[in-house]
Amino acid sequence: MFPPAAPRHLVQFNPKQVLHAFTDVLVLGGGIAGLRAALAVPSSQRVLVISKEKVEISNSAWAQGGIAGVLSPEDSFQDHVTDTLIAGDGLCDESVVRMVVEEAPRQISDLIRMGVKFDHHNGHLALTTEGGHSHARIVHALGDATGHEVMRGMIASARGAPNIEIKDRTFTLDLLTHEGRCVGVLVATPREERLAIWAKATVLASGGAARIYRETTNSQVATGDGMAAAYRAGALLRDMEFMQFHPTLLYVAGSSRSLISEALRGEGAYLRDKDGTRFMLEEDPRAERATRDIVARAIMRAMARTRHSCVYLDLSHLDSEKVRGRFPAIGRACAEFGLDLTKDLIPVRPGAHYTIGGVCVDRQGRTSIPGLYAAGEVSSTGLHGANRLASNSLIEGLVYGMICGEAAGREAAGRADTFQVPPLIDEAHRETGPELDLQDILNSLRSLMGRAAGIEREGSEMAEALEQLRFWCSYVLRREFTQREGWELSNLLTIGSLMIGSAQVRQESRGTHFRRDFPKRDDTRWLRRITCRPGGDITADVQPLTPEKTSA
Ligand code: SIN
């Protein structure tokens, strides 16, 4: 069983002893998917958005590359669909891919209407390309700070909407369920009070879990809290074996591992190993513009071959004025370490970037729990298959955010205005014991994930890692913590167990999941998705995907 049985809630809970709030639609998460959901709810419904940090801090705001959408006459929906299916390596849900791709241009126009200023070239939206894209179709802003500009526009719109309230620095402890339905959430407020928020419909948009790795591009908020809360509440999670590793994080000892956008390679940057060899030429006909799974693995091989801790990005052959103008923020990040992006070799290596798996949703964004919808990185829609195409994440957040917001608004409108607080109570015994060094467990967990569930995995290592996780879970999950550090650790241990448990089940290599002991893709056995069920069952779907639906 992964993880070992744990209490239903992170903390003991009695409605008589907590504060209460009521709303029509509750949105958990203030990134792109959460705010898009909030903005899609009809203005007659009250919306409460809960953000773990200040709403300005989210993975969405850190996005550099851009948003993919078919916007030029040379491009077509079919080509964007095909590129997404190829990247997804056989596991995409083609109907979802088509729906998201066809909706993308409208979502980009909506952002422009909200006041988001994308970069222009000769009076038209400037479009760039990234790994796996057959056309230039990625809009960007402020050169390489797309997320910052998009979130600026969306936050301003949400703050301007009279029906939307944003509560920030509020930690989502647990989803509250009654008779199988999600009825709200228990949160910890900035003043460390417990608050039960009761809602007619709830949208989970709390982001991913890549902070479970030491080397990651993600902001400190990405600790899988919403995913773990949904799992404790009984939701199905899917595709948890697929963690996307971005090929290029700045690798300077002592620096934070900042993302060096894929757009650099899109604009023509080369990857060189320690000896100066442009190794991607041997690896894939698309060279540096191959999909992320391929480039990340090739980098790991180049590092092993040259016995060196990184490879290098080389932009010295590109027009230096253009590079400076296009990548101002990345240029500044490099300059902090005395590196000139236009001339110097920039040390990079792969790191965890995007949690492909998550809470299983249907095309309407519904989870397996009535009353609960999910959008963005916390969810598993089937868009990304086994490997996400670059710049397809913000667009997924926008499309599913809108779908979930509209559906939650409809559901809330159909429910009675009077609400009885249900007799929910959790006074289950929690273990006590010596004080734990939570940072020490977290560091050990992050190292374990890198070793056992990194870019390459192997059955025997994962079996040992699961034993180790079982042991940590056995004493951490049965404790009650009073601070965020303990709640996050409990959530990460839960998610780590599901990730490795799922990776152990999938005995093949596909997309971001490469197994040294099963190095080939195996469509005969594994054209299936793996689902984590309440109670710890992790199994492959009985019904395989049909090849026509997955082939490019
Ligand atoms: C990047 O700029 O390389 C990241 C964009 C993405 O994750 O799609």
Image (cartoon, rainbow, N blue to C red):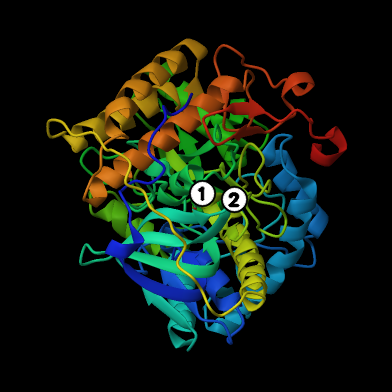
Report the Cα–Cα distance between label 2 and label 1: 6 Å
Q: Quadrant of residue 441?
A: top left
Q: Quadrant of residue 479?
A: top left
Residue farthest toward the right in the current orientation of the protein:
548
SS of the residue under disc 1 = loop
Labelled disc at residue 130? 2
Q: Is mark 1 within 8 Å of ligand 1?
A: yes
Lateral position of residue 423 relative to residue 85, left or right:
left
Tags 2 and 1 touching, CB below 8 Å:
yes
Q: Residue at x 39, y 75 (%)?
A: 166
Lateral position of residue 455 relative to residue 311, left or right:
right
Q: Nearer the viewer, residue 132 or 442?
A: 442
Where residue 445 appears, as percent x and y from the top left, is 31, 30
Lateral position of residue 147 relative to residue 417, left or right:
left
Where residue 137 appears, as percent x and y from the top left, is 67, 61
Q: Residue at x 56, y 60 (%)?
A: 394
With respect to residue 351, does 504 lie above or below? above
Q: Badge 1 is on which residue?
A: 262
Q: Nearer the viewer, residue 472 or 336?
A: 472
Question: Which quarter of the rendering shows the C terminus?
Answer: top right
Tell me, yes or no, if residue 154 can be seen here: no
Q: Amino acid at mark 2?
A: Glu
Q: Amino acid at mark 1?
A: Glu
Where residue 513 appears, as percent x and y from the top left, is 57, 28
With respect to residue 93, does 3 lie above or below? above
Q: Residue at x 33, y 53 (%)?
A: 13
Lateral position of residue 479 relative to residue 413, left or right:
left
Categorize mark 1 by other alpha carbons within 10 Å: few (<14), some (14-19), many (20+).
many
Q: Earlier in the sequence, mark 2 or mark 1?
A: 2
Q: Is mark 2 within 8 Å of ligand 1?
A: yes
SS of the residue under disc 2 = loop
